[in-house]
Amino acid sequence: MLNKLFYGVLIFLLAIDASYAQLPDFTEMVKTNGDAVVNISTTQKAADPQAGVDQQQMPEDMPPEMEEFFRRFFQGPGRGNSPRETNSLGSGFVISKDGYVLTNHHVVNNASEIVVKLKDRRELIAKLIGSDESTDVALLKVEAKDLPVVEVGSPEQLQVGEWVLAIGTPFGFDQSVTAGIVSAKGRSLPDGNYVPFIQTDVAINPGNSGGPLFNMQGKVVGINSQIYSRSGGYMGLSFAIPIDVAMNVVDQIKSKGKVSRGWLGVQIQDVTRQLAESFGMDRPHGALVSKVIPGGPAEKAGIQIGDIIVEFNGQIIETSGELPPRVGMTPIDEKAKVKIIRQGDKQDLSVKIGLLPAQPSSLANGPAATPEVAVNRLGLAVADLTAEQRQQSQVEKNGVIVQKVNKGIAMDAGIQPGDIILRIQNNVVRDAAEFNSIVAKLPVEKSIALLVQRNGSPVFLAFKIEK
């Protein structure tokens, strides 16, 4: 009996030992790469600390010191209007022996002085070579030679579930190391249209921003940039900029002094289940074109409103957020192959990529009210657009304005008063009489796509008329 118990305990201990043996050992990786990770401190004219922070992410009972760290981490460019001198901390890493350093744009934005602190405790004044707000990448230069550098890896080969490691200065603690796994790839975040973020569960906190994310081969695959938090600290949702996106920015800054991006000239949205059904698709995927910019590359290539882009240069587009980064990194004037679905049929088009305008034209606010008309079977009252409304909304022809939305089908679909209805299914809406005539003939138990313009931006909505 004792022998059986002894062997049972032995087997149990061996099993535990085997499981621990399978966990990764990061010690050599930290020894090899730690010297190339730097602390970055700045003196800067920062915006109002109350501005630019999502208040839903900040509980009322947050300690003042945590709130300050949180604001520093998330404080974006151009937010707020009360300049003041502040000191901020962040991280960065050396990418060349002659002193080029990568970090986040928001770490050094508006800085009057940037100090890079090396692991050997040297402190060097850095020059900002250039930065890009859209990708949140900044390139610095310090005067030094034979600096330790990181090796750049390939985010494309990174797999969900793979171990990754971060080195940085959270809360000012130098050379802090945390590890975790890749939670997802290609995440689209607000204000990050040109970055397919790497999501990880690596513990990232204020001060880690701008530091490197390493794969198991000890190569940098990303720049730690953002966290999602309700407390100001780590909650298991961390986001890194893929290093290939960052190095594209670096190359452009070095060669041209600025960053240019490819431009397709469309506005897009995700395809929902109901929209997929209305467009005759077997499942939701792709980027639905809700607007084509006149004179832009897409219009010249024959792309139309209602087309669904499902491939770009041979790369599958599952969600609309995947398209902008791929277009943005495509060289200007290069011809790209685009596969679309139009009215249920697939087509291949060739698009000559244009240059993204520096300041896209702004659209006017929603039009003013007009006299109410009768409510149709969708629960909508619509009217023709006046000349003044067309000028305000920049809708030259066609379209009707929604005057009233009763409870029911239209309200459930998200239609709002002031929306301008441009299309219903494949029918262009010319006036209120035609729209009501189309609505009267709509089939039941079938998803219908409706294109509306709201505050200058087009969006497809879907609804179904029940029996």
Image (cartoon, rainbow, N blue to C red):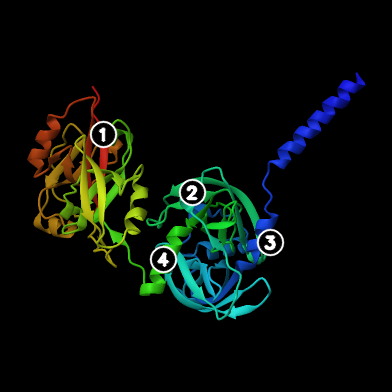
Helix, strand, or loop for circle 1?
Answer: strand
Tell me the amino acid under the disc marked 3.
Answer: Lys
Q: Earlier in the sequence, mark 4 or mark 1?
A: 4
Against 443, residue 381 (above or below) is below
x and y percent of residue 308 in the render? 25, 42
Give how far apart the Cα atoms at labels 3 and 2 are.
24 Å
Report, in whole angstroms, how far the alpha carbon at label 3 lies from the one at label 4: 28 Å
CA distance for labels 2 and 1 = 40 Å
Q: Secondary structure at mark 4?
A: helix
Marking on residue 219: none
Q: Nearer the viewer, mark 1 or mark 3?
A: 3
Please identify, in this view, whether the residue under mark 2 or under mark 1 is nearer the observer.
2
Is residue 107 shown left or right of residue 441? right
Q: Earlier in the sequence, mark 2 or mark 1?
A: 2
Query: The disc labelled 2 sits on which kind of residue?
Result: Gln
Distance in Å between CA atoms under marks 1 and 3? 58 Å
Q: Earlier in the sequence, mark 3 or mark 2?
A: 3
Identify which amino acid the numbered label 1 is placed on: Phe
Residue 157 - label: 2
| Amino acid of disc 4 | Val
Q: Are marks 2 and 1 in contact (CB under 8 Å)?
A: no
Q: Residue at x 9, y 45 (%)?
A: 430
Observer-side mark, 4 or 2, equals 2
Question: Pointer 1: residues within 10 angstroms few (<14), some, or many (20+)?
Answer: many
**Image quadrant containing the N terminus:** top right
Mark 3 and mark 4 lie on one chain; the one further toward the N terminus is: 3
User: Residues under labels 4 and 1: Cα distance?
Assistant: 42 Å
Q: Which residue is mark 3?
A: 31
Across and down, in percent, residue 267 comes to 26, 52
**Residue 249 marker:** 4
Q: Tell me the residue that label 1 is attached to.
A: 463
